[in-house]
Image (cartoon, rainbow, N blue to C red):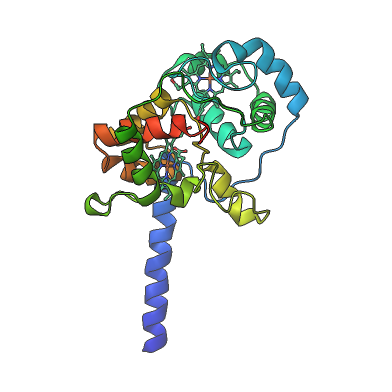
């Protein structure tokens, strides 16, 4: 009887497995098991010098607060983002048309090139109010338990330079290099992305679901405070 029960259970589990992943596979990209990205940084630098520098800066630090810095970002994260512009799962932007003609090898090379640049970001020209920066820093470090906001540092690093497991060589940990660095990131870009997660525009990867839940708990003032604090991080103390 017991064995029969177990078989029946396995049969049910298999039936569920048989249908569910197939249906889900089409719905979102699972980033929990991916191959580390490899590429030719010199070839990437050459492409970047003609195609990317006007918006992302010659050294990967953007001249405009709405355009993200790319310098020192994880290659695995950058590559996944580039793939997403190509497949159209990020909101339409200047990036969408730009990456269409690029080959997969170009995307890898560009990702490796930007990842290798020094994360040498200057603080923003105009600093936010101290009270706003304080609120942003508190949310980043401690979250807001009353509203279910988790501490951002748990996944983006105490210094906002990435997940603590991102440096691990173990293949199961490659996923943590798809958790982006936020240190010194452009405020307007960060705020826009957080609102994109919150409004449900980004629901195409296993990582999107993590951030969608986080952002759904943030109000506008909190989003702007965290964005201002992250952008101001490179300021001398
Ligand atoms: C005309 C301006 C422009 C050019 C040129 C441009 N980008 Fe972008 N890029 C943007 C903007 C704006 C965003 C921000 C988000 C959005 O609107 O999609 C962005 C976002 C990105 C992101 C996502 C970063 C993140 O943190 O998620 C990557 C990666 C990127 N660009 C790489 C490149 C590469 C590589 C090139 C050259 C092949 C390039 N960009 C050229 C404007 C540009
Ligand atoms: C449980 C882990 C986790 C927590 C906690 C978390 N994040 Fe994230 N975050 C991620 C992952 C994974 C991504 C990549 C999402 C993707 O690829 O769509 C991400 C992406 C982001 C991005 C997009 C960056 C870019 O360059 O486009 C921002 C901004 C961000 N998170 C801010 C925050 C803030 C602010 C908090 C705290 C309120 C937070 N995150 C908490 C895991 C987390």
Q: Point out residue 79 in the picture as x, y percentages from the top left corner.
A: 59, 32
Q: Is residue 6 above or below residue 93?
A: below
State the residue at coordinates (28%, 49%). 144
Q: Point out residue 93 in the picture as x, y percentages from the top left corner.
A: 44, 17
Q: Is residue 14 left or right of residue 109?
A: left
Decide which of 6, 178 is in the foreground and name it. Answer: 178
Q: Is residue 149 above or below residue 182?
A: below
- Asked whether the viewer can see residue 71, the reply is yes
Decide which of 235, 17 is in the foreground and name it. Answer: 235
Q: Point out residue 134 in the picture as x, y percentages from the top left corner.
A: 34, 39
Q: Ligand 2 is found in which quarter of the picture? A: top left
Decide which of 174, 168 is in the foreground and name it. Answer: 168
State the residue at coordinates (57%, 22%). 61
Decide which of 72, 134 is in the foreground and name it. Answer: 134
Q: Is residue 15 left or right of residue 218?
A: right
- Asked whether the viewer can see residue 200, the reply is no
State the residue at coordinates (43%, 64%). 14
Q: Is residue 37 left or right of residue 229?
A: right
Q: Point out residue 74 in the picture as x, y percentages from the top left corner.
A: 60, 38
Q: Quadrant of the N terminus?
A: bottom left
State the residue at coordinates (64%, 20%). 59
């Amino acid at each position: 009887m017991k064995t029969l029960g177990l078989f029946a259970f396995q049969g049910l589990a298999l039936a569920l497995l048989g249908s569910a992943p197939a249906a889900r596979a089409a719905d979102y990209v699972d980033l929990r098991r991916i191959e580390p990205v490899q590429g030719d940084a010199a070839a990437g630098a050459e492409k970047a010098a003609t195609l990317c520098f006007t918006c992302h800066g010659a050294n990967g630090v953007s001249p405009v607060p709405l355009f993200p810095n790319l310098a020192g970002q994880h290659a695995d994260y950058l590559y996944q983002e580039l793939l997403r512009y190509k497949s159209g799962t990020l909101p339409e932007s200047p990036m969408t048309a730009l990456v269409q003609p690029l080959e997969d090898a170009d995307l890898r090379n560009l990702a490796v090139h930007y990842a290798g640049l020094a994360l040498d970001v200057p603080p923003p020209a105009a600093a936010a109010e101290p009270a706003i920066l304080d609120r942003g820093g508190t949310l980043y470090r401690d979250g807001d338990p009353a509203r279910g906001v988790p501490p951002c540092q748990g996944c983006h690093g105490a210094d906002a330079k990435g997940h603590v497991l991102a440096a691990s060589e173990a293949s199961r940990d490659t996923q943590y290099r798809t958790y982006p660095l936020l240190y010194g990131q452009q405020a307007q870009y960060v705020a826009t992305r957080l609102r994109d997660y919150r409004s449900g525009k980004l629901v195409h990867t296993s990582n999107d679901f993590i951030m969608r839940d986080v952002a759904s708990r943030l109000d506008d003032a909190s989003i702007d405070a965290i964005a201002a604090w992250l952008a101001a991080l490179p300021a001398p103390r």
